[in-house]
Image (cartoon, rainbow, N blue to C red):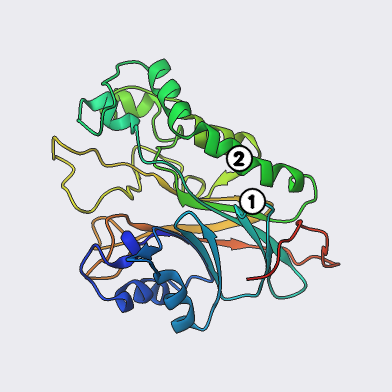
Amino acid sequence: MTFNIWVGGSAGKQPVEQTTKVIRESKADIVGMQETMTGGQDTSKIIADSLGWHHFAQGGNTSVLSRYPIEGSSPNKWGVLINIENKTRVHFFNIHFRPSPYQPYQLKGIPYGNAPFIKTEEEAIQWANKARGDQVDRMFVDINPILKEGTPIFITGDFNEPSFQDWTLRAAKKKIIPIPVKYPATFKVVGAGFTDTFRKVHPDEIKTRGYTWTNKTTPQDPNDFHDRIDFVFSRGVEVIDSQVVGENQQNAEIVVSPWPSDHRAVISTVKIKPMEKPNDKALPLDSKQ
């Protein structure tokens, strides 16, 4: 699961138990969580303790919560190594990329910070790379060494950038989006052999948009633009299902109300083939937290 809990779960004026309820009712096993801090307190640790789960604080307002033991982290804490049952280990990376400049707003003429308005795909890609390109590259510094080993890998997170698989020519012709854009963050992740689990299960980007941003405005609001910016990517597993978790049946397959965040969550179900031998060298580990 990926879940931006909105300023440590406090901004939605709901008790932390409501954020915990989302995880319980979704039946998630591993959660990549963003915006984990509020008032200097790490809400994700409180949630993990209440679930009886393992917890790893990555820094940068992100954490991994796991039903299974966390054995350590990648060198720069972009990911962790998790020991699943049946001698199987998986790498689990979790990110929260910069929110601005935000290209959908730039293209739609919606003021946000000091970013200029833009009109072309080339400009959108340039601004996306300027906003998040260095973060994507630094994440792959930790990912690249493990790509060839065959161990399952997941990337979850709030990308603050849409998917190139959603901003297609088909979607533009339907006037769902202003223009097609090959957004670079998701394009690089998919280019490295990862599968967008939601789009794998729901391949029609016209019929099923899967909006995760935002539940705080209507789709008709001229000062906002709804999109799918929260992702679960996988590599080396079989994707079984992927669902949006949110506030009502019109916008989510799994409903929890009242909903505590300004983002909807995404939960994906996968089948992992047990390894014949545990991969003890699957990841350069820092000390276990």
Vertical relation: 136 (above or below) 287 = above
| Quadrant that contains the C terminus | bottom right
Q: Secondary structure at mark 2?
A: helix
Residue farthest to the right, as pictured: 277
Q: Horizontally, is 199 left or right of 276 in the view?
A: left
Q: CA distance from mark 2 to mark 1?
A: 9 Å
Inspect this view and state whether residue 248 appears. Answer: no
Residue position marked by numbered label 1 in the rendering:
76
User: Residue 157's x, y, as percent?
Assistant: 47, 51
Residue at 71% x, 61% y is 286
Q: Horizontally, is 112 left or right of 204 in the view?
A: left
Q: Quadrant of residue 55?
A: bottom right
Vertical relation: 276 (above or below) 122 = below
Vertical relation: 44 (above or below) 183 = below
Residue at 33% x, 22% y is 179
User: Residue 93's x, y, as percent?
Assistant: 59, 54
Q: Nearer the viewer, residue 120 or 220?
A: 120
Q: Horizontally, is 73 left or right of 51 in the view?
A: right
Q: Are marks 2 and 1 in contact (CB under 8 Å)?
A: yes
Residue 138: give its label: 2
